[in-house]
Image (cartoon, rainbow, N blue to C red):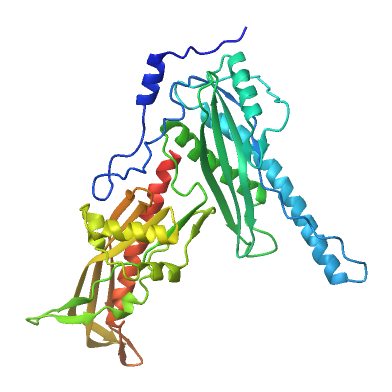
């Protein structure tokens, strides 16, 4: 006898009301008509779960070229190296599926109120996936299997992308695609994506890397599993888990800075041209393995003729920034935008005592402190996903080398303080991304 959860009007009403999503933090307050409502919490009204063994749903690899003729020794060696590399990649993919299944079971067992249905093996007839998508026949069979097992839903996990990178650092990464198939015949929930990667450096002595590929696979899967379970439990998906395009806008730099000299009545105005020349490389966010960063030259071209008040992004007020950001996002066809600015520069200089060997000399101390703001904006509705305000500083003092005074120039001090501030911004972004692993 098949058991199916009754689907009543009250049940459907409550399900439609169980909406998750971040609070309204959109530029201008109102969202456009094209913005969709946040999705249901994936595990809403799911108390028992049938977890299918993970599957490989990877696009086909490019075929290995034919084996070269015997006299071509160099070509034969290159072909053999490619063949061995393909075999090792296939072994890593197979290992990733096994490790993913064990890790996911352990992680899901920690969720309160969720019971995992044990000892059920489901073997749908035909292929589960076609061109990377779940077939309709397989979805029907999986839903029926969940009902027969007295489970509320089937969790279907597949490795949709898997890659390696070799160089100074050995990197292994993967992307996991997850579907939740309710047993009551309601629409399939998902897909939900999560990514994980792990890297290692070469050994200082001897051949090989400091970590084996098996260790890297385990670390990458542990990371993507934490993201996946967080998404299933809260409905929050890590921004760069899906294949997407990201634009990092050049930092907004003030035109000049006032340098305060100790003992003088007024300050000295300094140009920030040298800092403006590196405005497009100040912010270097870690985007992950499946996100594509748009070339900086394309970003600059898209920003031409688009006046934008960057300060309005961080003040939360409606201004020309909203229109400019929409135009830039549509021109570049990006899903996310990074915006940053240097909001304040405090520059002071005072006289100090220095030493030239054992002889006391006069010197100066230059102290620069910079306040930087950064934000991650979703292009579809201009929702601010992450925002941070940090301060970075640097101190330069006179040093005597061969009886000659040496000290960093004004532009060098300002640039060093800016790099320090943007380093803290990058750390703040990493902290924001870690919340999707809790």
In the picture as drawn, the residue positioned furthest to the left comes out as 265
Asked where in the image residue 137 lies, by quadrant, the reply is: top right
- Residue 264, image x, y percentages: 9, 82
305 vs 341, nearest the viewer: 305
The quadrant in which the N terminus is found is: top right
In the picture as drawn, the residue positioned furthest to the right comes out as 70
Left or right of 47 in this view: 414:
left
Left or right of 15 in this view: 265:
left
395 vs 346, nearest the viewer: 346
- Residue 368, image x, y percentages: 24, 72
Asked where in the image residue 82 lies, by quadrant, the reply is: bottom right
Q: Is residue 427 above or below residue 205?
A: above
Would residue 281 be seen by someone viewing this image from the given angle? no
Residue at left offset 42%, top offset 63%: 284
Q: In this view, does 73 lie above or below 140?
A: below
Total label count? 0
392 vs 384, nearest the viewer: 384
78 vs 44, nearest the viewer: 44
- Residue 320, image x, y percentages: 24, 60
Left or right of 325 in this view: 151:
right
- Residue 360, image x, y percentages: 23, 87
Would residue 356 be seen by someone viewing this image from the given angle? yes
Residue at left offset 16%, top offset 82%: 268
């Amino acid at each position: 006898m098949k058991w199916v959860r009754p689907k009543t009007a009250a049940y459907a009403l409550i399900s439609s009301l169980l909406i998750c999503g971040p609070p309204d933090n959109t530029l201008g307050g109102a969202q456009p008509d094209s913005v969709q409502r946040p999705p249901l919490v994936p595990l809403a009204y799911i108390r028992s779960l049938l977890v299918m063994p993970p599957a490989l749903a990877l696009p086909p690899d490019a075929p290995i070229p034919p084996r070269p003729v015997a006299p071509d020794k160099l070509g034969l060696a290159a072909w053999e190296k490619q063949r061995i590399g393909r075999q090792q990649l296939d072994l890593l993919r197979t290992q990733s599926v096994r490790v993913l299944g064990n890790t996911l079971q352990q992680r899901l067992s920690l969720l309160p109120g969720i019971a995992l249905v044990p000892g059920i093996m489901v073997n749908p007839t035909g292929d589960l996936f076609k061109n990377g998508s779940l077939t309709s026949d397989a979805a029907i069979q999986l839903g029926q299997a969940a009902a027969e097992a007295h489970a509320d839903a089937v969790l279907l996990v597949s490795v949709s992308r898997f890659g390696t990178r070799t160089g100074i650092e050995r990197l292994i990464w993967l992307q996991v695609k997850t579907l939740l198939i309710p047993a009551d015949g309601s629409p399939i929930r998902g897909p939900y994506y999560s990514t994980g990667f792990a890297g290692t450096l070469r050994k200082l002595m001897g051949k090989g890397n400091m970590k084996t590929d098996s260790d890297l696979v385990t670390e990458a899967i542990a990371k993507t599993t934490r993201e996946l379970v967080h998404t299933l439990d809260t409905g929050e998906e890590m921004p760069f888990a899906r294949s997407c395009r990201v634009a990092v806008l050049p930092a907004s730099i003030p035109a000049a800075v006032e340098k305060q000299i100790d003992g003088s009545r007024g300050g000295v105005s300094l140009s920030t041209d040298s800092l403006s020349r590196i405005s497009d490389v100040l912010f270097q966010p870690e985007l992950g393995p499946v996100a594509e960063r748009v070339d900086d030259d394309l970003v600059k071209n898209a920003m031409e003729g688009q006046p934008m008040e960057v300060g309005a992004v961080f003040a939360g007020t409606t201004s020309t920034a909203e229109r400019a950001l929409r135009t830039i996002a549509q021109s570049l066809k990006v899903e996310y935008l990074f915006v940053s600015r240097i909001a304040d520069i405090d520059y002071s200089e005072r006289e100090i005592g220095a030493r030239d060997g054992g002889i006391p000399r006069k010197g100066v101390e230059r102290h620069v402190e910079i306040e930087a703001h950064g934000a991650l904006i979703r292009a579809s509705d201009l929702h601010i996903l992450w925002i941070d305000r940090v301060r970075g500083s640097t101190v330069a003092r006179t040093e005597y080398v061969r009886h000659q005074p040496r000290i960093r120039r004004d532009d060098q001090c300002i640039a060093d303080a800016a790099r320090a501030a943007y380093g803290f911004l990058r750390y703040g972004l990493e902290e924001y991304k870690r919340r999707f692993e809790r």
